[in-house]
Amino acid sequence: MARLLEKKVSRRHFMGLSSCALATIAIGSQVKVLKALAKDGRIDAPTGLGSKDVYSSCGMCVNKCGFIARVKDGVIQKLDPNPEFFIRSRAMLCARGNAGVKVVYDPDRLKYPLVRVEGSKRGEGKFRRATWEEALDLVAKNMNEIKDKYSRASVMFASTEGTFSEHFFTQLAECYGSPNTLRHPTLCLSSNIQGFGATFGTNPTPDVLNADFIIMSGANRSEALMTPDSIDLLRGDGGKRKLIYLDPRFTKTSAKADEWYPIKPGTDMAFILAMIHVIVTENLQDQAFIDEFTVGFEQLVPHVAPYTPEWAATECEIPAADIRRIAKEFAAAAPRAVYYQGRRSSFMANDTQMRRAMAILNAIVGNWDTKGGLIPNANIELTKHDYLAPWYDEDIPGRLDEGSVTYLSEKDGAWPAFRDRALAADPYPIKGMMVYKQNPLASVPNRAKTLKLMEQMDFICTIDITMSDTAWYSDVVLPEATYLERQDPLEALGGIVPVVAFRQPCIPPMFESKESLWIIQEIAKRLSEEIAAEFDFTMEEHLHHQVKHNPQILEDLRTKGIYYESTEPNYGRTRGTALKTKSGKIEIFSQKYADNGLDPLPVYTRPTAVPSNRYRLLVGRHAYFTHGTTANNPYLHDIMPENTLWLNPVEAQKLGLKNGQMVKVRSAVGEEKLKLEVTQKIRPDSVYMAHGFGVLSKAQTNIYGKGGSDAALIEEKYCPISGNVAMHETFVEILPA
Amino acid sequence: MSNKRYAMVLDTRKCIDCKACTVACKAENHVPLGRENYRNWVMEEALRGRYPNLGQEFTPGQCMHCANTPCKRVCPTKATGVNADGIVTVENKKCIGCKYCMTACPYNARYYNEEIGAVDKCTFCEHRILTGREPACVETCPTRVRVFGDLNDPNSEVSLLLAKHPHRVMKPEMGTKPYLFYLI
Amino acid sequence: MSFATVIPKRPGEMLWFGLLCLGMMAGAVGVVQVLIHGHDHVYNVSREIPWGILISTYVFFVVSSTGLCLVSSLGDVWGFEKFAIIGRRGHLLALLTLVTGFGTMAMELNHPIRMGLYAIISPNFTSAIWWMGALYGFYMVCLIVEFTSLMRGWTRLAFWSGLAGFFAAITAHSNLGAVFGLLEARHFWYGSYMPIYFIVSALASGAALTVLIVYFNHKARGIEMPPVYQEFMYTMGKLQALFLGILLFFVVWKIIPGLYGQPPEKYETTMAWITGPLAFNFWFFELGLGILIPLIIVANRRTRTVFGVMIAGLLSTIGIFFMRYDLVIAGQMVSMRPEAVEGASHGLIHYFPSFTEIGIVIGALCLCLFLYSLAERVFDLEGGHRH
Ligand code: SF4
Ligand code: SF4
Ligand code: SF4
């Protein structure tokens, strides 16, 4: 029997709704509204527009893979990988990249400017549809009020990477006069940048394609996809390469690795130091390289003397014989070998020093700027967009988190440190929150604290494409056009072979969503004439400005979706030139650290032991979601509808818990409920849950009420050197729910 | 022009279970949402061993385009057929929804698509092949697990791969003569 | 026959018709659900278990039809005088069960109308379902002609159509077994067992239903059962003992090869059937109610009374309903790709009918009984035997 009376709201039915006018809109019932609209018959796509192919870059994660949008009759049919993008992304799109179409045609997307209903509380989700005019006025009015009442620094600006348009937002912060921008690195790789930067003067890229021997710890490359590494790891010239993988979990990378060691969490440094110990005691280092390019090897040798493999074996629970053997194999394969540094958030509060150890290990065997080693990034220059932030006579204090960590990035800030000071109004209060596509409620550990932070705000505005948790707790929500609907500036993607990418609209923005530049310009106009003057340009002008020195770049991007100057790596560029370190050489011993009262050579600190009846909570990635941003995507939701808590069967038996049952997970800062997955794939002393669930926003209709939030459980310890959060220092208790 | 015999060769050793192929297929072929609606899949095989000695395989699959075709045999209205190039097809308008083919397929390659009102399954993206493009799953696969081509052409990549490497098919005991080959 | 005779008057009758109407309403609700929401949303059948209780109920109906036809042909076609007394009623119920069976099947099919068209213009002769349609279609024609002839007293035509119907029933029904038996993919079904077993179980079904007709026909009219009918009941009791004995034999020989040597998939299915999720159905309904208890009743001379035989018939009919269900579901329980199924324990997939499906099944059963009860009032079903 065919279904006679009702048609489903299929993607086909969804098309063409953009022009429908809606009166007030209750967020929770958006789907219903869409269904109703689908029924009124206006379900057909506009015709007569023909087919076209649009070259652009993916916006689902940080990799920005190139794609070709197949557009027919004004509707995006499919995103196909762009073969021209081979040098960067190996001409592929991952599951998320393929699911991108659903970002546009998602009933849950933001469609109109929304204003929290007067008298309702934040988080109740009572929004009313507003005109752009009203919403923007409200934003400017509040920003001006806060500046008058407190200071310009009292508005914080949180934004995130990957949008290509973030620059305009941080420019707005600067022009408005607030020093308090908070970007993602302290939730991501700032300790990595710091550790490698202190050693090499830069954070290099491992030449995975050409390496014969790779050791990975803290980088789950078959699930946390990074292009081209994830692909090269398997594609490469197969068979010859050896992959040693350290992870407390059996991940998909473990499944592909030659050897997997379920290392005790937080002890990676012991493993690395022991490897260095073996190499220097057995004289396997590349002495010629060390002599020519490094400083401080003499101090290293006595420093690692106590770090024997036997010692390390008890720390990280990897047999001493294996450590010894791996060290020898690594040295033998060098310089076509890498200890792969990964890029994830840090595990422990001593993460920067752990990254230093990784860098040093690579340095002493000469894996630097040579085929198959660590390669300093090359870059293609684009003309910078210069602007002059207005000068304000008033007294504006410096960053709120100034001095909270040793090396604070002026632009990035340090999230957890910032939050603590903001909560204490130390030294001054933060009363306004401007958010561009960041979702601190899901991404900053200890969600309860972030909620408190938001509570104390006079005003919160979020610009996003979906109703994230943070948007859900905002006063004004502004819908940005998605990456498939907007023009973005050019972005130089550095790497072993650098390229330039950009985004151009595949279809015009649907509903009332707008390009971020327009949104920022409109806010600027309402703030002051001076600020508006700094944004007095069109996107087109901006693009041409970026390629002033070489218009070919834009030409190539429009027709091929990518610009590159060479398809081959250029190894050895830095040989004979000074590195960006104090000594101009690779700093095994860091005088800079010594001067700042930090350990100049990495000193091992043992992680806090797991208390009895507690488990260490681990975070990690999988290939279906990008952090907290894509779990609600209908295609991806089909793959993973909820998260589970992994627990080793031995422990499950001890606790009398069964696979599939609901459990309560309790940490010092929160409690979450989710399904238990009893699996051999994890160390008995640890538990794991995927990120992206347990959301607060009811407008994420697919996932609301499913699974648990890791951000609600993790305690906000952080690395005192880089400010990076330490994700693996939380212990939890598991109880039947 | 002589006919083709389309086939797919898969090197599962490279598969990382990223499910790009699954989503690409859903998007390309407008497969309705829902966990039971899919034309291709990637199976996480059972975990081998015991902590800490573990191993696991990921096996992508889809309609095997069997040469001895049970689904075609059982279809009462000839909605399921095999085209000249070996692709097993479903003619939507003839499908009566008896689901006999679903019970006959030993690979669970078919599902009932409510939106089109017929049983649906992998077509090797026939519409793409016609315009000279690869099937969506093949094109998007990051690690190039999947290779698609014509076995009637002795120099095609699939022919060369099968000549060079030992391989297997799924459930050979069923006698279905599948045209998805897995390298060992 | 006047309209007045059709209206139930006695309280018992009114209750009976009331109940049937309620049941039919449940079915109607189910059908409306399907029309509004589509199969996907109201049926519990899935990608892995595409055939659910509607198919098994369809099988139940057509098995009943076949059985009734075979048993009632004994008199009209094969000249066993004793059986002639149920000729009309038997054939009528055979027709009604067949029609309601088709109805149930149509509810499971997504496009019954397309079927009519393409089965004719695009037939596939290798498809057992195509043959099923063709043979049952022919069988239905035979039944209609046979019933009409019996009613009109056209004995020659009754004989020939009866004979044709008898063979159509056997071919159509063994072919229905083949619908399952030709599926190489489904180890539990595959092979020549199914066609043969279907015929045997049809006999048991037919015998059981016949005694129910006879018994309730008299009960409903409130008349004492004449000796010739009583005699018929005893005979049917003995026959039923034989049929159930054979059926038991079939069940045992279905199980033993399913366990012996643990043949892949067959073993898992057999275990699911006798010790797993279907075990209660198997031991209680199939074996207990369906075979053992009735067998004891009809085998024992003391309990083989009119009432006893009726009870045995009732119990085995209920049991047989579950036999069909278990058979259809069990065959699909082993996943074709065990890893693909979430929550599948030991690779077994579970199915439990939805409210809508159950509603439709109840509706179909009630509809069948309703039509029969109505027919009893409309037609003269007595004396359907030629002398
Ligand atoms: S890796 Fe996937 S999500 Fe990230 S940019 Fe590439 S296709 Fe998009
Ligand atoms: S796209 Fe390729 S690597 Fe990813 S799951 Fe599919 S077959 Fe495996
Ligand atoms: S895999 Fe299944 S659907 Fe495909 S040809 Fe073989 S039997 Fe038919």
Image: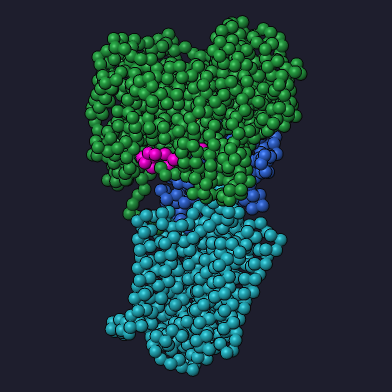
Chain colours: A green, B blue, C cyan
Q: Is residue B53 above or below residue A273?
A: below
Q: Residue at x 38, y 27 (%)?
A: A423
Q: Is residue C94 above or below residue A66?
A: below
| Membership of A695 in magenta stretch | yes
Query: Could you tell whether A359 is left or right of A448 in the image?
Result: right
Query: Could you tell whether B164 is left or right of B178 in the image?
Result: right
Q: Residue at x 45, y 46 (%)?
A: B34
| Membership of A686 in magenta stretch | no
Q: Residue at x 75, y 18 (%)?
A: A281
Query: In x, y percent, where is residue B87?
Result: 55, 44
Q: Is residue C368 above or below residue B145?
A: below
Query: A470 or A91, which lies in front?
Result: A470
Q: Residue at x 63, y 20 (%)?
A: A603
State whether residue A680 appears in this view: yes
Q: Is residue B104 above or below residue C200?
A: above
Query: In x, y percent, where is residue C79?
Result: 54, 87
- For the N terminus of chain A, the image quarter is bottom left
Query: C204 or A608, which lies in front?
Result: A608
Which quadrant of the figure has residue A464? Answer: top left
Which quadrant of the figure has residue A164? Answer: top left
Number of numbered tags placed on the structure image? 0
Query: In x, y percent, where is residue A216?
Result: 62, 27
Instruction: Provide the residue span drawn in magenta.
Output: A690-703
Q: Residue furthest right?
A: A282
State whether residue C155 appears in this view: no
Name the chief secondary structure element in magenta.
loop
Query: A582 or C166, which lies in front?
Result: A582
Query: In x, y percent, where is residue A411?
Result: 42, 17
